[in-house]
Image: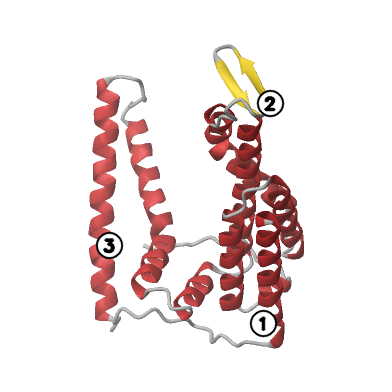
């Protein structure tokens, strides 16, 4: 069966022309630095900087907006809990809502969490939308990421579409047989059987793919079709992101 992997067209930008190794290293360092921020002002500046980077990378506004909304939906439970979970011990302002008590420090930590998550999410989106995924994974291997992890990520990216297509066919088969999902034992039993069948088929396909790769001389070493080449602009971009990250982290600590 032909496997079609759909990738979003990559717009020509400074990020698209940036060597994948330097770009991956720079954005990983920036993500780690953002994850350590504790104050609202540096976290907000980091978020604004990530939006500027998205504009430089020429990411579509609609795509960025949709991903931001998805991230906000994912962290919504933590945002709702933090104001009530962190106490000021009576030193700071607080508000009582019924039997719950919301603290100012909890609200600040929730805001910092939102800014950090959105910033890291936008950096990850820049990384994934300015170069093909196989090229980024090859850059990770060039940066001494273990070959096993790189191969797992490559195969997952390559065959995730196959698993979704298999799940779609199973869903259509159930629908044609009159199955309708309800909150009863029969539904849970059927969905469990479908999940089991999907896992079994995935395992069988993985064995066939492994045998085919070994027959073609695969020795477990990831290889890239293109050769990486460093130019002065790549190093300059890395140093710029590095100094910006260090400056924001130092500002946060001081």
Q: Quadrant of residue 156?
A: bottom left
Q: Quadrant of residue 26?
A: bottom right
For the point 56% across and 69% down, the residue is 132
Which residue occupies the foreground of this view, 111 or 8? 111
- Whether residues under marks 2 and 1 lie with C-beta atoms below 8 angstroms apart, the answer is no
Q: Which residue is mark 2?
A: 93
Q: Quadrant of the N terminus?
A: bottom left
**Helix, strand or loop at mark 2:** loop
For the point 25% across and 23% down, the residue is 186
175, above or below 240, in the image: above
Residue 235 — which label? 1
Q: Which residue is mark 3?
A: 206
Indicate which disc, 1 or 3, sits on the residue closer to the N terminus. Answer: 3
For the point 68% across and 76% down, the residue is 239
244, above or below 64, in the image: below
Q: Residues within 10 Å of mark 1 (few under 14, many from 20)?
A: some
Indicate which disc, 2 or 1, sits on the residue closer to the N terminus. Answer: 2
Which residue occupies the foreground of this view, 203 or 24? 24
Which residue occupies the foreground of this view, 124 or 253? 253
Q: Nearer the viewer, mark 2 or mark 3?
A: 2
Q: Nearer the viewer, mark 2 or mark 1?
A: 2
């Amino acid at each position: 069966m032909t496997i079609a992997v759909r990738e979003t067209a990559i717009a020509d930008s400074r990020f698209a022309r940036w060597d994948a190794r330097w770009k991956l290293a720079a954005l990983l360092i920036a993500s780690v630095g953002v994850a350590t921020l504790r104050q609202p002002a540096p976290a907000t500046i980091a978020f604004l900087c990530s939006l500027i980077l998205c504009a430089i990378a020429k990411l579509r506004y609609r795509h960025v907006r949709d991903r931001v909304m998805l991230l906000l939906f994912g962290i919504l439970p933590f945002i709702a809990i933090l104001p009530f979970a962190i106490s000021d011990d009576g030193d700071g302002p607080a508000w009582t809502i019924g039997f719950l008590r919301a603290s100012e420090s909890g609200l600040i930590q929730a805001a910092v969490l939102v800014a950090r998550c959105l910033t890291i999410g936008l950096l990850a989106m820049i990384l994934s939308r300015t170069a093909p995924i196989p090229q980024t994974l090859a850059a990770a291997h060039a940066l001494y990421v273990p070959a096993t992890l790189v191969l797992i990520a490559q195969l997952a990216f390559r065959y995730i579409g196959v698993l979704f297509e298999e799940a779609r066919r199973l869903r259509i088969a159930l629908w044609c047989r009159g199955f309708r999902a309800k909150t009863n034992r029969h539904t849970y039993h059927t969905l469990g059987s479908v999940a089991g069948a999907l896992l079994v088929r995935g395992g069988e396909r993985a064995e066939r793919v492994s045998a085919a790769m070994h027959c073609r001389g695969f020795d477990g070493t990831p290889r890239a079709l293109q050769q990486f080449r460093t130019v002065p602009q790549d190093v300059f971009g890395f140093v710029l992101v590095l100094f910006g990250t260090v400056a924001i982290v130092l500002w946060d600590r001081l």
